[in-house]
Image (tube, grey):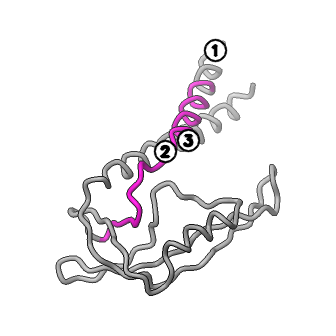
Amino acid sequence: MNKVLLLVLAGISIGILIHGIRMRLKGTGSRHWSRARGVIKESFVDTSVNTGLNDPNSVSYFAAVTYSYRVGGREFTGKQVTFGDHGTPRLAHANAILARYPEGREIDVHFDPDRPSFSVLEKSPGANWMVIMAGAWFTAVSIFFLLRK
């Protein structure tokens, strides 16, 4: 296999692995965050068209939610519903998220007490273990082939 291709694969795999670990850490760290009352300001389905080779012109749906909350007399705005939510090919999934957060609804906002501008609506473990495992597996395979004579 071409060394340049293997280096590119290793770089992408390491990026996926790091992203998965970061999302997992953020998600587990949010379990101990403070809570404030907030209100949903905007709630709609956003779309993105995939232009990749595997599935050109497929659509991903995102639950776009904007909310505001106050901490220590200061107002903040957030857009993060949960960690690791990167859209879905199923419109019904995005609509199910939006059904929980209609405009005007009062909600609990979980925020980092050390950085109150960093918030999330749903505390979750973050990235799926499959993302981390896939990143680790592809990293290991690409390094194995790079080091092989």
Magenta stretch holds residue 129: yes
Q: Secondary structure at mark 3?
A: helix
Task: Tell me where residue 147 sits by quadrant.
Answer: top right
Magenta stretch holds residue 14: no
Check disc 3 and give the amino acid type.
Val
**Mark closer to the observer (1, 2):** 2
Query: Counting other residues with Cα less than 10 Å from the Cα at mark 3, is it few (<14), some (14-19), or many (20 or more)?
Result: some
Q: Secondary structure at mark 1?
A: loop
Pointers 3 and 2 in contact (CB under 8 A)? yes
Please give the range of residues in magenta: 117-141
Name the residue beneath numbered marker 1. 148
Q: Residue at x 38, y 82 (%)?
A: 39
- Which circle's residue, 3 or 2, is located before the other in the chain? 2
Please tell me the numbered disc located at residue 20.
2
Quadrant where the N terminus lies?
top right
Please tell me the numbered disc located at residue 131.
3
Pointers 3 and 1 in contact (CB under 8 A)? no
Task: Tell me where residue 77 sits by quadrant.
Answer: bottom left
In the image, residue 9 sits, relative to residue 42, either above or below, namely above
